[in-house]
Amino acid sequence: MPAFPRPGYFIALAALLGLSLHLCAQWESKLVIYPEGRDLVRAQSSEEEDEEEEEDYAPTVARTEKGVSQKISRAGGLIVARYNFINFNKDNIGITFSLPEADYKKYLAGYGYTDAEMAGLRSWREKARLEAWNAAVKTGGKAAGEKAIAGVELDYETRMRGLFRSRGLALRKGNTVECDMPVIVKRNTKMMQALALAIQKIAAERKYGSEETTGAVLSLVQTALRYKIPPLVEHGVHTGGLLPPARAMLSGWGDCDTKTGLAASILSSWNTAKMVGVAVPGHYLMAIRRLPAKGDVFVRHEGLEYVLVEPAGPAWLEPGQVGKRTTELLRGAEGYQLEPFF
């Protein structure tokens, strides 16, 4: 006749399971849960169809020159953007940027994240925590269980940060997500190389110096691309409030973050261009390494002067010139933060 466990066995087993659930609940209350869709960007977001003007970062400049235009088309599996603009020499410049539609689709998949991806990470985390807890408690009790779960949490955060970084984003203080500008610039240097070479060819033909070549890039981004704020969530994808550079060129618009990323990605093709991102409350711009001329606005990084550049537009501002609002923010109580691009 088979032997059955005594009633006391079931009582002890129930008590052990109850203790395990109680300890798991205690540990759960200590965990930081990163909420879905809690994104923070440096500039306020809007829906894509709502075009908003930039706050007065750049003063209005009277423009009498004609010749600033954009034309974006699709034909034969190719997306082509043609821009005409005027540089600081008041020369008319025309450039073209294109990508095969298949390559463009693949490119866009490398930016932003979906709620489904985050849900998958959380599902893995819950399963891994339960397995780690059960295995550790059997041999080492509560202390071993907590240590095992701590290891899972570290792995979870590493995976989550890795996902964000691979999509041009970063998890910041307060569990908020925003665009990672240094990563975006570095990833897009090669993508923007053909455009940089086209501008360099024009500069050589017209005998431009480095300052005038930089000015050509800046005037393109400031004036040929419209100012418009990207949505935080677009077609289910959390964007971090930024269009990656190739999309900005093939869409014809962007905000301060987007235009800064584009300008820096083009300029980074030239090894002599050293740049830093400059973050102020509600706004983003950049600075390039060179000695400031009289009247130039600049910042210092590691003991060197970097002249400020305001890519947002729509004003026509040369390196060293920034808008009144930007100047106020730079001098404000919150100050500014610098992000070296390389």
Image: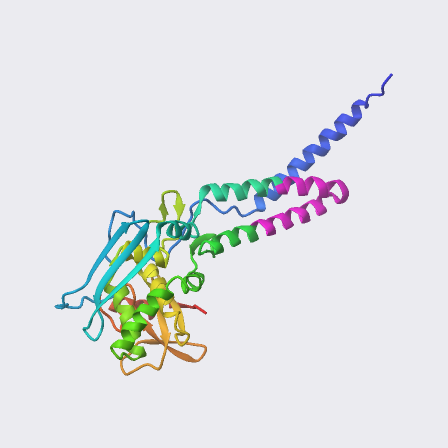
Q: Which residues are magenta?
A: 128-156
Taking depth in this image into account, of 266 and 116 the one nearest to the observer is 266
The residue at 28%/75% (across/down) is 203
Q: Taking 192 as reference, is 35 left or right? A: right
The residue at 75%/45% (across/down) is 140
Coloring basis for residues? rainbow
Q: Where residue 106 sits in the image (x, y, percent)?
A: 42, 50
Q: Is residue 198 visible?
A: yes
Q: Is residue 305 above or below residue 185?
A: below
Q: Is residue 332 visible?
A: no
Q: Which of the 4 image quadrants contains residue 321?
A: bottom left
Taking depth in this image into account, of 83 and 9 the one nearest to the observer is 83
The residue at 17%/68% (across/down) is 61
Q: Is residue 209 above or below residue 118?
A: below
Magenta run includes residue 135: yes
Q: Which of the 4 image quadrants contains residue 85?
A: bottom left
Q: Look at the magenta stretch and give its main secondary structure.
A: helix
Q: Where residue 292 sits in the image (x, y, percent)?
A: 32, 81
